[in-house]
Amino acid sequence: MVLTILPASLHGGNLYLDYNANQPEFVASIMVVFNYQYHYFGIIVTIYMFFFYFVKGVVLDCKGKDKGELIAHIILLKTPVLMLYPTYAELLSYCSGFMFADMPWFNNLFTSLLADPRDSSPAPYLLFYASLNIASTFLLPISFMLLCFIVLKIMARFCKNKIETLKNIGWVIYNYFLGGLSFATAACIQGAFRNPMENYFTVSSAFYLLGICLFLVLLGEAIWSSAKDSYNLFKIRTIAKSVILSILHYNALYLFAIVLVF
């Protein structure tokens, strides 16, 4: 890392810096300077998976159960940065590609309006998010999901002969966003613990509470649906993996071993 970024300092024999090279702002600036393009791989994979399972689950195998539950596990490949930070900038670029489903390029607009950038967050998270508030991490995808489900519900009301097809479309959309939503809500709980709320009636506090409520809803639905059909255990597995991955920065070695078991 030193040879790549600061070759002159090595030859000068002085490695003293006036700033911390481990700060997220410094590492993120290196990504921009060297212009790594590895995130395109993650973007291509997530787009491909959505369309593959859309065609498979809605058209080719409309009566099958597989509606893309694997998607959530693949998209969670964005989390190695939590385990290996600070590390090579190209790895950060690679991980950011799998955040394509999180819609980060538009979601950042909500950060300045609905989240407090002064909130305490683990250093690796600051590479991607200004705050662990759900408004800063996943508000736009949540809004998009709600819009899709409202449209599907309206269509089901007027096209009763297409109800099964519309259900399949809904499950593909749900599974596509499940990994990111589970991870964002688990991170929101972590952020709420790091930033005790003195006033529950502020905008930032409301979105921390919303993230906690969404996590409980996800977990409750996963347990309920798994009790009805053991095939739905993939939801519990996804949520459990998201929780563990969200705290990887605390103890990468032990927690990563637990993730492998899941």
Image: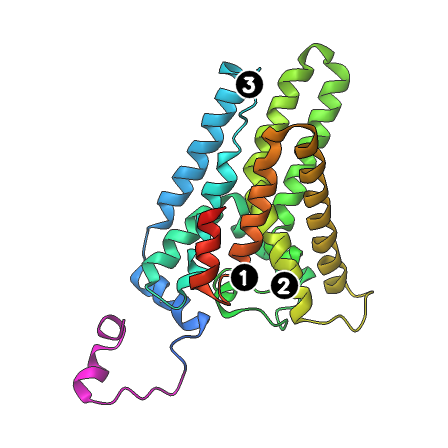
Separation (CA) of disc 2 from disc 3: 37 Å
Up-down: is 168 above or below 186? above
Q: Residue shown at 39%/63% (left/top)?
A: 84
Up-down: is 166 above or below 7? above
Q: Amino acid at mark 2?
A: Gln
In the picture of the structure, the residue carrying the numbered disc 3 is: 64
Residue 63 as seen in the image, left or right of residue 77: right
Q: Position of residue 211 (x, y in %)?
A: 69, 54
Instruction: Give, as a single range, the part of the protein colored magenta.
Output: 1-19
Front in this rendered view, residue 41 or 63: 63
Residue 198 as seen in the image, left or right of residue 140: right
Q: Residue shown at 38%/77% (left/top)?
A: 21
**Quarter of the view holding residue 144:** top right
Q: Residue shown at 60%/58% (left/top)?
A: 187
Q: Position of residue 172 (x, y in %)?
A: 57, 29
Queried whether the magenta region covers residue 206, the answer comes back as no
Residue, far left: 11
Q: Amino acid at mark 1?
A: Ile
In the picture of the structure, the residue carrying the numbered disc 2 is: 190
In the picture of the structure, the residue carrying the numbered disc 1 is: 247
